Image: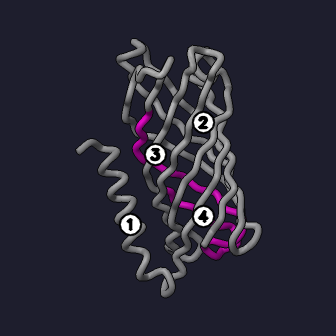
Amino acid sequence: MNKLTGYILATAAALMICAPAAQAQAVAYNAKATISVPMGGEGNGYFLDHKVGAGVGVAAQIPVFKAGSLVPRIDYTMYKNEDYRDAKAQYLKAGFDYDYYFSGKANKGLYAGVGVGEGSTEFQQAGRVKSNQNAAYYAAQVGTMFTKHMGAELRYTYTEYNTRSFRYQVDVPTLDASFVYRF
């Protein structure tokens, strides 16, 4: 079992463990839709050429302390550049964040957070897989909940891959803007 599978299983287990306690501890579940801009080596170069990607994700907001939440999450994002040999990159990430809410109450209002996890990336050209890599990622985000159920998040994620297939190291920072729906 690779690291990403372990992270996905751990994240899924955390989400399921939280389910029975959701009413008692005010655990909230999120679904999100994301637009993502690749930067760094893949975003600035010929491969993705700043093509905007799209993604989806799920997470749980588990209140810890008075103004914080632990956030196990799974995110999927895809980028496509038809102008360069039908290049495509797909990212599947599983990890944990900690969000601090400035209102003093978890899951309400403006927040800032940091996160870590494991990501799996598949790079393709002309329909053929060029590289499939796993690597750790680091993230920082700010967001707000406009209402009890709707919010927005801006997230910066940094991942660095040592791609043997491309014979060079690839840094893959992304800037994501997400619409968040909380259940």
Label 4 vs 1, first from the N-terminus: 1
Work out how far the residue at label 3 is from the one at label 1, CA to CA, in angstroms. 15 Å
Work out how far the residue at label 3 is from the one at label 2, CA to CA, in angstroms. 13 Å
Q: Are marks 1 and 2 in contact (CB under 8 Å)?
A: no
Asked if one can make out residue 11 in the rendered structure from this viewpoint, the answer is yes
Residue at 37%, 35% (x, y): give it: 134
> Quarter of the image containing the N terminus?
top left
Residue 92 vertical position relative to residue 29 in the rendered view, above or below: above
Q: Are marks 3 and 1 in contact (CB under 8 Å)?
A: no
Q: Find disc 1 in the rendering and name its residue.
A: 14
Q: Find disc 2 in the rendering and name its residue.
A: 174
Q: Find disc 4 in the rendering and name its residue.
A: 100
Within 10 Å of the Cα at label 2, are there few (<14), some (14-19), or many (20+) other Cα atoms? many
Q: Residue furthest left?
A: 1
Residue 109 vs residue 7, the one in the foreground: 7
Q: Residue furthest top?
A: 167
Residue 15 vs residue 160, the one in the foreground: 15
Label 3 vs 1, first from the N-terminus: 1
- Disc 4 residue type (three-letter): Tyr
